[in-house]
Image (cartoon, grey):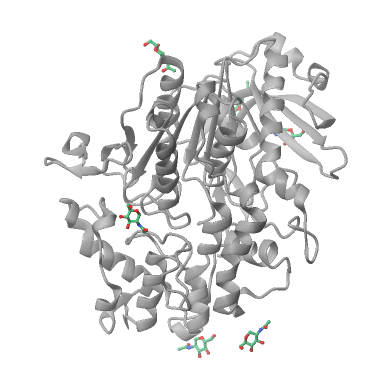
């Protein structure tokens, strides 16, 4: 997978694995508003002079570059956008004394502004996106902005910025990534919008998945009055904990010295789906109620699986990896101690438990950890670029959970359940998380929602959480998924009209036309009879 060129958000990002913590794609677009005759007054105003008054406490603006982009076309997640007209603004600033240089990217429609501002998030170690990826957001009428967080824009690796030198964390850039650049970006983006249109945005929205979802929670917790509506999707919440847990299946394989073939692991996932698919009442390749699926991988050992036409036999080691993946980290020295959740059965192994092989023999395989997880252990925990994670002892590995919480909890965790200031501001937030998420165990989201609920039983008045059966990390998977424009429309209707999203519409990703109304947590989706593709065949319990 290394060296592969993957289309992520319409941007060519070299060397990014397909499983990288993803940003939100915008799929079907209803109406394009930044298309058509440009407003000539706005066209004239699209230059650096217009934006000289940007002023955000703690920052020093170094440069503002603005120029019109007309008749722009781009392809973004299967959707082609043409004839877009916007003002492309780049703000460069520093935090005096911190030796950083951060960029804010903004696209302001030259026609058809809908009066709203939208901030957009990043994925993995990528803090945000640039004008090319914001253009489709602006196509729908939003003034949009994002930030590079002060490090290389589309570099999924933190290798270039994590350390000042071996042993020494670059705290300034880590803090920029964690939250500081997000608050700045929003204030700068809102000021750019106000100066350009001579009118402040009526509403501000945040959209992000994965790291972008964590960033959404950053706003609700740390900057509770910047956004009216937040989509915090499949959030990388409790980053300092789950990202260590994300490495656990790799650690188990390293300790065994055995890396099963990807097709064996795929066959285990398929066997789990086959065993548990029908317990929700419908055979559709989706485990809708994964918590009652108790499939035991040891029942497979010795049986045959098909590997691209060649037969293989399920190994004992494969069953060990599956258990580790599903149960989550457990130290042999203290098996009762809980570190973090595993994933639901049926989730693809390739995110956390990936292996790569030279040929069809397992002896040619090695581990293929998720880059963020491997780098977190090596760069942020060990602070040593030369550290070899494959050689860790159990003690070394399990001690990282405690050390990580000690060192980074307050900066990265984003798990403060007290949302009272966001509630008082009148903000509304929606989170959905795929029940087959292969990179971020979904129970981190339900745990957080439960904690918010424990503090405030009226949480559903301003924050709603939905689980999506059979959906992978941010997108993909056999299950119907909430589409961004529809989810954002539901959030806007809640914020602007008080229309409460009782359920969340999700649509098939496989072309079978299935529609589901996802249930407000802690209710779950249950089949009540009828054609499984139709939403009325499902209810919430
Ligand atoms: C806009 O771009 C398209 C190609 O994307 C081109 O065919 C068309 O002529 C352009 N229109 C104008 C007015 O420049
Ligand atoms: C926007 O402006 C920046 C800085 O001038 C430039 O690098 C980038 O290519 C522009 N983006 C588009 C989509 O025109
Ligand atoms: C997630 O939480 C649910 C509800 O508490 C539980 O039934 C399920 O086993 C948990 N799943 C994992 C993978 O930990
Ligand atoms: C598979 O690859 C390994 C390591 O590259 C090699 O040692 C082994 O001989 C290969 N086996 C076959 C059957 O090609
Ligand atoms: C990792 O462990 C193996 C086996 O014990 C050893 O041969 C190798 O030198 C170690 N590598 C490093 C970088 O410590
Ligand atoms: C609010 O309701 C009005 C009247 O039904 C409708 O036209 C408008 O689109 C709604 N706004 C949102 C953001 O849904």
The correct choice, above or below, for 326 with respect to 488 in the image is: below
Quadrant housing residue 272: bottom left
Quadrant housing residue 108: top right
- Left or right side of 522 for 433: right
Quadrant of the snapshot with the N terminus: bottom right
Q: Position of residue 157 (x, y in %)?
A: 66, 57
Quadrant housing residue 374: bottom right
Quadrant of the snapshot with the C terminus: top left
Q: Residue furthest front?
A: 455
Asked if one can make out residue 481 in the rendered structure from this viewpoint, the answer is no
Number of on-image labels: 0
Q: Quadrant of ligand 1?
A: top right
- Point 56% across, 53% down: residue: 239
- Point 23% across, 63% down: residue: 274
Q: Position of residue 250 (x, y in %)?
A: 51, 72
Q: Position of residue 463 (x, y in %)?
A: 43, 32
Q: Nearer the viewer, residue 129 or 280?
A: 280
- Point 66% across, 45% down: residue: 178
Q: Position of residue 338 (x, y in %)?
A: 44, 64
Q: Nearer the viewer, residue 86 or 23?
A: 23
Asked if one can make out residue 212 in the rendered structure from this viewpoint, the answer is yes
Q: Nearer the viewer, residue 296 or 19?
A: 296
């Amino acid at each position: 997978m290394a060296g592969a060129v993957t289309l992520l958000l319409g941007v060519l990002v070299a060397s990014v694995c397909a499983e990288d913590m993803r940003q939100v794609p915008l799929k079907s677009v209803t109406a394009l508003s930044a298309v058509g005759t440009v407003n000539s007054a706005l066209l004239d105003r699209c230059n650096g002079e217009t934006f000289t008054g940007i002023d955000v406490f703690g920052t020093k603006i170094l440069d503002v570059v603005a120029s019109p982009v007309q008749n722009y076309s781009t392809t973004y997640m299967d959707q082609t956008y043409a004839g877009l007209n916007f003002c492309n603004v780049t703000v460069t600033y520093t935090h005096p004394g911190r030796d950083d240089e951060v960029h804010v990217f903004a696209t302001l429609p030259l026609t058809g502004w809908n009066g709203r501002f939208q901030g957009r998030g990043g994925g993995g170690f990528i803090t945000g996106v640039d004008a090319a990826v914001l253009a489709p957001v602006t196509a729908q009428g939003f003034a949009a902005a994002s930030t590079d967080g002060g490090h290389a824009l589309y570099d999924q690796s933190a290798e270039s910025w994590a350390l000042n030198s071996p042993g020494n964390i670059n705290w300034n850039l880590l803090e920029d990534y964690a939250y500081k650049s997000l608050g700045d970006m929003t204030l700068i983006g809102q000021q750019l919008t106000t100066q350009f249109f001579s009118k402040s945005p009526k509403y501000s929205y945040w959209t992000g998945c994965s790291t972008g979802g964590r960033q959404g929670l950053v706003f609700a917790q740390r900057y509770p009055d910047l956004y009216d509506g937040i989509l915090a999707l499949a959030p990388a919440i409790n980053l300092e904990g789950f990202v260590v847990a994300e490495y656990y299946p790799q650690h188990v394989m390293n300790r065994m010295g055995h890396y099963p073939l990807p097709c064996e692991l795929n066959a285990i996932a398929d066997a789990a789906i086959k065993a548990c698919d029908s317990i929700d009442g419908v055979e559709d390749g989706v485990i809708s109620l994964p918590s009652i699926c108790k499939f035991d991988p040891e029942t497979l050992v010795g049986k045959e699986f098909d590997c691209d036409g060649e037969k293989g036999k399920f190994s004992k080691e494969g069953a060990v990896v599956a258990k580790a993946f599903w149960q989550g980290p457990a130290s042999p020295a203290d098996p009762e101690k809980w570190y973090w959740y595993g994933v639901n059965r049926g989730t693809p192994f390739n995110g956390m438990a990936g292996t790569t092989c030279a040929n069809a023999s397992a002896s040619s395989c090695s581990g293929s950890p998720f880059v963020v997880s491997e780098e977190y252990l090596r760069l942020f925990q060990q602070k040593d670029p030369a550290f070899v994670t494959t050689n860790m002892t159990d003690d070394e590995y399990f001690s990282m959970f405690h050390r990580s919480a000690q060192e980074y909890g307050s900066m990265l965790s984003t798990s403060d359940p007290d949302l009272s200031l966001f509630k008082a501001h009148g903000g509304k937030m929606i989170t959905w998380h795929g029940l087959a998420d292969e990179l971020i165990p979904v129970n981190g989201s339900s745990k957080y929602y439960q904690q918010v609920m424990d503090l405030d039983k009226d949480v559903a008045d301003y924050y709603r959480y939905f689980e999506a059966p059979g959906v992978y990390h941010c997108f993909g998977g056999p299950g119907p998924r909430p589409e961004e424009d529809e989810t954002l429309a539901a959030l806007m209707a809640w914020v602007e009209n008080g229309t409460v999203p009782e359920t969340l519409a999700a649509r098939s990703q496989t072309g079978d036309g299935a529609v589901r109304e996802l249930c407000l947590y802690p209710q779950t989706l249950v089949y009540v009879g009828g054609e499984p593709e139709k939403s009325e065949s499902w209810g919430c319990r």
